[in-house]
Image (cartoon, rainbow, N blue to C red):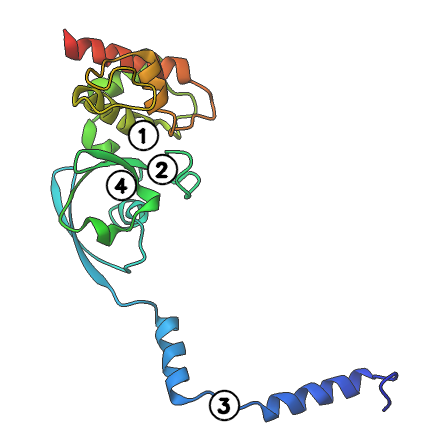
Amino acid sequence: MTADHVTRRGLMQGGGALLAAAPLASPAQAATTASVSKGAPMTPVELTVNGREVHLQLDPRTSLLDALREHLKLTGTKKGCDHGQCGACTVIVEGRRINSCLTLAVMHDGEEVTTIEGLGTPEALHPMQKAFIVHDGYQCGYCTPGQICSAVSVLEEIKAGIPSHVTEDLDKVTFSAEEVRERMSGNICRCAAYSNIVAAIGDVAGEAEA
């Protein structure tokens, strides 16, 4: 068989010879492969979620979002982009809003987590949930849990005097529609209900000041 005349039979025979000549994996390599196939060892994680203490055994690579949705069945928190760009997965951890898809559950061992389910119930809605209903601050509703969790935190940030990129007087942070739009810019609404969302947040801010 010459170099310019390769048959299918010859190619298969040559490939078989190469496989036969390949060295076998060492015991150490085999053990590593077996360990990877079995997955990482489980890690105990303790969280206080919506006021309830929970104990989980998790793969250390599990995101907080997946821990909430898949392990605790709190599916109100939505998985949107899974890259921290849409805000649908926003929850409140130790009083601060975060994208739960961008952080590992093991990083929050011992901490308090509040999801949309922990803000209110159908029988006892949170003021922000009521305002979103009154002002029609949602359409498809997919982003709404993250929007509401973020909105609740936004008012707390303003109350605490934490400035944003549009704050003019760093010594006196005050509520304004511009502040709300800037602070809520990480929460995307594909239905574009932004003006209604700002109105809902404004209503809750007015009630808090009254």
**Which tag, 3 or 1, sits closer to the chain's start?**
3
Residue 172 in percent (x, y) is at 20, 15
Q: Residues within 10 Å of mark 2 (few under 14, many from 20)?
A: many
What amino acid does circle 1 point to? Pro
Where the C terminus falls, by quadrant? top left
Q: Secondary structure at mark 1?
A: helix
* Cβ–Cβ under 8 Å for marks 1 and 2: yes
Q: Which quadrant holds residue 158? A: top left
Q: In 3D space, how far apart are the residues under numbered discs 1 and 2 (Cα atoms)?
A: 7 Å
Number of the label disc, if any, that sits on residue 83: none
Q: Which residue is mark 4?
A: 74
Residue 78 — which label?
Answer: 2
Query: With 200 as the anchor, is 17 left or right in this view?
Result: right
The image shows residue 5, relative to residue 103, as above or below, that is: below
Disc 2 element: loop
Q: Position of residue 98 (x, y in %)?
A: 28, 37
Mark positioned earlier in the residue sequence (4 or 1)? 4
Real-space Cα distance between discs 4 and 1?
Answer: 11 Å
Q: Which residue is mark 1?
A: 145
As helix, strand or loop, the secondary structure at mark 4 comes to: loop
- Amino acid under label 4? Leu
Label 3 crowd (10 A; few <14 / some 14-19 / many >=20): few
In the image, residue 17 lies at what x, y percent? 66, 92
User: What's the residue type where badge 2 is placed?
Assistant: Lys
Q: Earlier in the sequence, mark 1 or mark 2?
A: 2
Q: CA distance from mark 3 to mark 4?
A: 47 Å
Name which residue type carries label 3: Leu
CB contact under 8 Å: marks 3 and 2: no
Residue placed under numbered mark 3 in the picture: 24
